[in-house]
Amino acid sequence: IRDLINKALQILGYEQVDFALTHPDSFEHGDYAANAALIVAKKAGKNPKEVAEQIKAEIEKQLPQEISKVAIAGPGFINFYLSEQFFKQSVQEILEKGDNFGKLEKLKGKKMLFEYTDPNPFKVFHIGHLMSNTIGEAFSRLAEWNGAEVQRMCYGGDVGLHIGKTIWGMIQNKVAFPHDGDRLTDKVKFVGASYVTGNNAYDDSEVAKGEIIAINKKIFEYLAGSAVDEDIEVCYKKGKQWSVELFQQMYQFLGTKFDFNIFESEVAEAGKQKVIEGKEKNVFAESDGAVVFKGEDYGLHTRVFINSEGLPTYEAKEIGLAFKKFGITDWNQSVVITASEQRDYYKVVLKALEQIDVHIAESTKHFTHGMMRFASGKMSSRKGNVIAADEFIEEIKSDVAEKIKDRAYDEVLTEEVKNKVAVGAFKYVILRQASGKDVVYDNTQALSFEGDSGPYLQYAVTRANSVLKKATDAGITAQVLSGEDNKQTEQDAITELERMLYRFPEAVSRAGDEYAPQIVTTYLTELAGVFNSWYGNTLIISDTAGVAYRVALTKAFTHVMQNGLNILAIPVPSKM
RNA sequence: GCCCCCGUAGUUCAAUGGAUAGAACAGCGGACUUCUAAGCCGUUAAUGUUGGUUCGAUUCCAACCAGGGGCACCA
C-alpha cells in the first residue's frame, strides 16, 4: 500500500513524503488508513481532499486484488479495504505457519543480552523481582520473535553490606538456624528475618553497626581467598545456596531460563581496577577519602564508586559487570531492566562508563519498571514490609482454587490450572501497561478474572481449543475454501476476526522496536474480545455451509493467541 | 532546594501528531438455555489548569497545580 501511494504521488508529480499508514480505530474506516494526502496537500498548498481524490483515482487504475475498495474520508484520509481474498489467504498463511506465525527476521544476526530480575542471595525474592522478570522475559522473547540471537543473564549481590547485616542476624539467631532437612521456604524465611534483624540493629545500635561492618569486611577477604571464622563461612555458604535454589524454582515457575548468572563477587575487583585506572585519567576524583564521579559536570549528580574503606560500591561493580558482559561477546545491544528508583543512578554509572569505554556505554540500554504499589505503601526489601513473591503467588493460587472448586478437575489438572492461571493473572497486570510506570496492584481487581485480564485471554484460547476438539471428533477438518466454493459459504461478510488476525506480526514488530510488550497485550485482548463476540453469536460447528472455514478461523485464532501469549510468557492451560 | 518520571470515565489501564479518545471493573438494563456463563449484547461516564506550535494536540513546547522517585560512601 505504501508503494502504491508513493507511485501515485510520483505520477501525480508530488514529492515523496514520509506518511503514516495505520489501522483505523474503527473497522468502518477500513483496514488501513494513510494520511499522505494531508501531508502532501500542506506542502503543495492544496486542499487535502482534492489531493486524496487524485491519489485514489490513480491507485484505482490498477487495483491489486488484495484490495477491495479505496475510500476518502474525514479531512483527507485514504482508507483501504482489504478483499475477501486477502483474508482467506491470510488465514491460510496462519494455518501453514502455525507456531511460527509472527516470527520476523528484522533483528537477524543481532546479538542481544538481557539482564533482569537480579534478586540478591540472602534477600527476599519479592514482587519487584517478579515485575522485573515479567518485563525482562517479555523483552527477551520479543527480541527473539523479531529474529535476534538472545541471551539472558541474571546478576546477584553476593557481597555488600546487606550480607554483613544478614550474617550478623543469622549469628544472633543461631538457635533458629535451619537444619538440612527443613523446607526450603523456611530456610529462606530465616535468612530474610535475619536480614531484618541485622538491618534494624545497624540503624539502632552503634555496637552492632561496628560488628556488621567488620563481618562485611571479612567476607570480602574471604572471597578474595583468606580464611574466615567458621560461623561466618557456614552462614555465607548455606545462605547463598538456599537463595539460589529458591530462585531456580521461581524461574522454572515463571518460564525463564537464564543462560548465565554473574555475582557481584566476580566483578567487584575488576570494577575497582577500572575505577582506579579511570581515576588516573581524571574520570574519577578523590573526595573525603572516597573515589567519586562528579555527575554535576553532565547535569547529573555525584556518586561514590570506591568508599573510604577502599571497597568498591555498587557503582564500581556495575562498571566491572559491564566489562564482564562485553568480555563474553560484543553484544549489538545489552539491555538492563531495573526498578525505576535506579533511573538516575544508572544515568550516572552509564555516563562514567562512557568516559572509560564509549562502545560499551553506547551499546547498553537501561529500562525501568515501576513499583508495585499496595494500600500499605511502597514495598522495600530494606525495611521489613516486603511482600515475598512466593507468598504473593500462593495467595493468587488459593484464589484460583476457590474459583475452580466446583469444576470436576482431577488433581493434576487442578494444579496445572492453579499455576498457569496465577502466572497469567499477575503477568497480565504488569504487561498490559507501558513498563516504567507504577503498577497498582489491587487484590480484588487482579484476582477477579474478568474482562481485561490474563485469564480472559487464557479462557478464550481454551474455549477455542475445545471447539477444535469437537470438530476433530465430528471429523471436520479446518479448510480454507477457495474461489467459487467460497461464494457458497455463509462467510461472505468478512468478520472482524479475520480483520484482526493478520495484524499480529505488525504488533510483534512494533512492540519489539519500542520495547513495548503492552502493544502485544492490547492486541491480544482486542483479538480475544473479537473472538468471544464471534463465538457468542455464531455456532461454529453446525450443519450450515462453511463449517470447515469457521473451524479454520478458530484454529488460526488459537495459533495467534498461543504465539502472542508465548511472547508474554503467559502459559495456556489445557482446560479452564 | 536541585534533577527525573507521571497526571485520560467513580476505579485500573489503552491510544506510532489525525477521523466519533478505546477497553475493563464498578453501576444500570438484557438475551440464550445447543461448541466451556472466567463468556455474550445494550447503556451511563474522562484528556489536571492556562497559554503556545499545527490544517489538526491526550501526544510536542512553556508556566502553574497535584502525585511518585532520586540527590555521597546501601543496593
Image: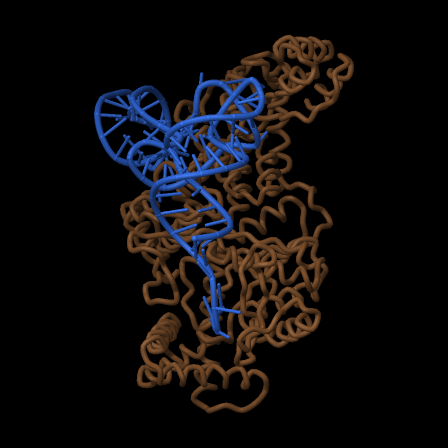
Chain colours: A brown, B blue
Residue in view at x 35 percent, y 85 percent: A207
Residue A532 sits in quarter: top left
Q: Is residue A413 visible?
A: no
Q: Quadrant of the N terminus of chain A?
A: top right
* Residue at image location 29% in from the left, 52% down from the top: A375
Is residue A488 visible to the viewer in this orientation of the structure? yes
Q: Is residue A452 left or right of residue A333?
A: left
Q: Position of residue A570 (x, y in %)?
A: 48, 48
| Left or right: residue A309 compared with residue A149 | left
Q: Position of residue A485 (x, y in %)?
A: 60, 16
- Note whether A98 is above or below A383 in the view shown: above
Q: How many marks?
A: 0
**Residue A126 versus residue A79 in the image, above or below:** below
Q: Residue at x 46, y 21 (%)?
A: A543
Q: Nearer the viewer, residue A188 or A399?
A: A188
Note whether B68 is above or below A193 in the view shown: above
Quadrant for the C terminus of chain A, please. top left
Task: Pinpoint residue A453: horizontal percent, then vertical percent.
Answer: 40, 41
Image coords of residue A560 (percent x, y): 55, 37
Measuring 73% from the left and 9% from the top, which residue is drawn there?
A61
Q: Is residue A26 above or below residue A555?
A: above
For the residue pair A551 and A121, the one nearer the viewer reads as A121
Left or right: where does residue A200 sit relative to residue A326? left
Of residue A16 and residue A73, the one placed in the foreground of this image is A16
